[in-house]
Amino acid sequence: MSKNFVESKTGLFPYNRKAAYNYAKRWALSRNPKYYDFQHIGGDCTNFASQVLHAGGCKMNGGKWQGWYYYSANNRAPAWTGVEYLYNFLINNDSRGPIVKISDINEVEVGDLIQLNFGIDDGFDHTPVIIRIEEPRKPENIFIAAHTYDRFDYPLSNYVYENIRYIHILGYKK
């Protein structure tokens, strides 16, 4: 059995960061035809981030109102495509799917998520995926992949934002 599917002592299965990175690299500047492109109806960033998490092994959670899943454009959880919905799902999830902790710049790894508030209101607006980290850890040394305005290997410091949160993927539950 592959090491990636062996449950850890914490009860979590390991997030495959290499697979997440490879997916981000393949699809950051284009669209996977298996998924609807939400770019022109609110943005595609969280849809892309969810795809990356799923590619990294995180199992979908089919909970009707509180889940995280995508079967089609019309059969998906709000958490799959909405920035705040994804955040709320991730920080509250204790069943099937990704298990996370809110962290800081010093704890994140490739494949983790960042959410940005651009200052339009109090809500967060964008969900890029970390694909490269250089030292010392500061925004100009964190590089992301994202959709809506498609980016790959783009410095976090190029964004103008009011607030930021780092979401570290601890693993997932089956």
Image (spheres, helix red, strand yellow):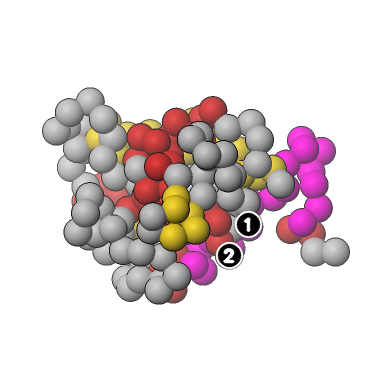
Q: Callout 2: few (<14), some (14-19), or many (20+) C-alpha neighbours within 10 Å?
A: some
Q: Is residue 22 magenta?
A: yes
User: Relative to 29, is 118 on the left or the right?
Assistant: left
Label 1: few (<14), some (14–19) or many (≥20) C-alpha neighbours in 10 Å: many
Residue at 80% of width from left, 64% of height from top? 2
Question: Horizontal and vertical percent for residue 99?
Answer: 60, 38
Q: Is 103 or 146 nearer to us in this picture?
A: 146
The circle on residue 19 is 2
Measured as percent of width and height from the top left, residue 95 is found at 66, 35
Q: Position of residue 33 (x, y in %)?
A: 40, 74
6 inside magenta stretch: yes
Total label count? 2
Secondary-structure class at tag 1 = loop
Q: Is residue 140 visible?
A: no
Can residue 81 be seen here? The reply is yes
Q: Residue at x 58, y 45 (%)?
A: 62
Q: Nearer the viewer, residue 98 or 109?
A: 98
Residue at which label 1 appears: 57
Q: Residue lying farthest left?
A: 120
Residue depicted at x 44% and y 31%: 88
Image coordinates of residue 84 in percent, x first then y, are 35, 35
N-terminal of the pair, mark 1 or mark 2, is 2
Dot 1 and dot 2 residues touching (CB under 8 Å): yes
Q: Amino acid under label 1?
A: Gly
- The kind of residue on which mark 2 rests is Ala
Find the magenta span and give its range.
Answer: 5-23
- For image coordinates 71% across by 46% down, the residue present is 174
Q: Secondary structure at mark 2?
A: helix
